Amino acid sequence: MKLKVCGMKFENNISEISNLNPDFMGFVFWTKSKRFFNEGNINISGEIKKVGVFVNQRFELILEKINKYKLDFIQLHGDETPQFCKRFESYCKVIKVFNISKDFDFEKLSPFEEVCDYFLFDTKGDSYGGSGIKFNWEILKNYNSKKPFFLSGGIEINDLREIEKIVNYKIPLKGIDINSKFEIKPGLKDFMKVEKLINKMKK
């Protein structure tokens, strides 16, 4: 089970959390987000995959960020098409986000299977980006793709037992994506909380 810590914003905090060696760290390049990253450099271990988060942004702007920050992945949170995702195949890997509601149709993922490396499932809200609210994870029993995915949306330390149940669905859960429930304020992660989660995941 991989861990992605998303919405990193502050240089010292980035360095601090990187010392815990999460598998992925996410940086939001969407200006409307409270966690918009414009701090400068991203100095983290090469073992940690850097993920740039974008929402309906121009190909050229995303490519500029890929090159500037040496992004390993981009995470597309908007209404991007399969054709748009495919344009990045020679530059980096792609995570496509889908907002899940109680009547979500997993068949709509099929056009993206060949052009994305992972899916990420978050809770459907009024806007793009995380809501900090969980969706009903039981809907994942309907997931019938072999494409690995990340689980997101209001995940807390005490959810690990429920997440184990999802593993037992025999579906390709790649990892979990944490954000707001591990923050002191938007973009500033609580080192002790993240460390506690990582220690629990190791067990």
Image (cartoon, helix red, strand yellow):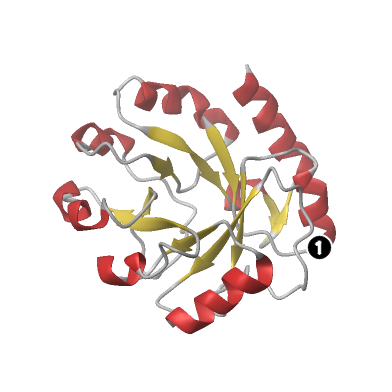
| Nearer to us in this view, 48 or 181 | 48
Q: Position of residue 74 (x, y in %)?
A: 50, 62
**Residue 27 appears at what percent x and percent y?**
62, 63
Tell me where residue 135 appears, x and y as whole percent: 35, 45
- Residue 16, relative to residue 173: is it above or below? below
Q: Nearer the viewer, residue 139 or 158?
A: 139
Residue at the image position 62 percent from the left and 72 percent from the top: 67
Please identify the quadrant where the C terminus is shown: top right
Residue 40 drawn above or below residue 1? below
Q: Amino acid at mark 1?
A: Glu
* Circle 1 Cα neighbour tier, 10 Å, few/some/many (<14 / 14–19 / ≥20): some
Q: Residue at x 26, y 65 (%)?
A: 82
Image-based side of 158 in relation to 9, left or right: left
Of 88 and 35, nearer the camera is 88
Q: Residue furthest front?
A: 90
Residue 6 image offset from top left, x and y in percent: 59, 54
- Pick out the residue farthest to the top: 203
The answer to which quarter of the image holds residue 187 is bottom right
Res 171 quadrant in image? top left
Residue 36 appears anywhere in the view = no
Element under disc 1 = helix
Camera sees residue 203: yes
Q: Is residue 150 left or right of residue 195?
A: left
Is 173 left, or right, of 43 in this rendering?
left
Closer-to-camera residue (99/143): 143
Q: Measuring 22% from the left and 48% from the top, which residue is drawn there?
A: 102
Q: Is residue 104 left or right of residue 95?
A: left
Q: Which residue is mark 1?
A: 11
The residue positioned 27% from the left and 33% from the top of the image is: 138
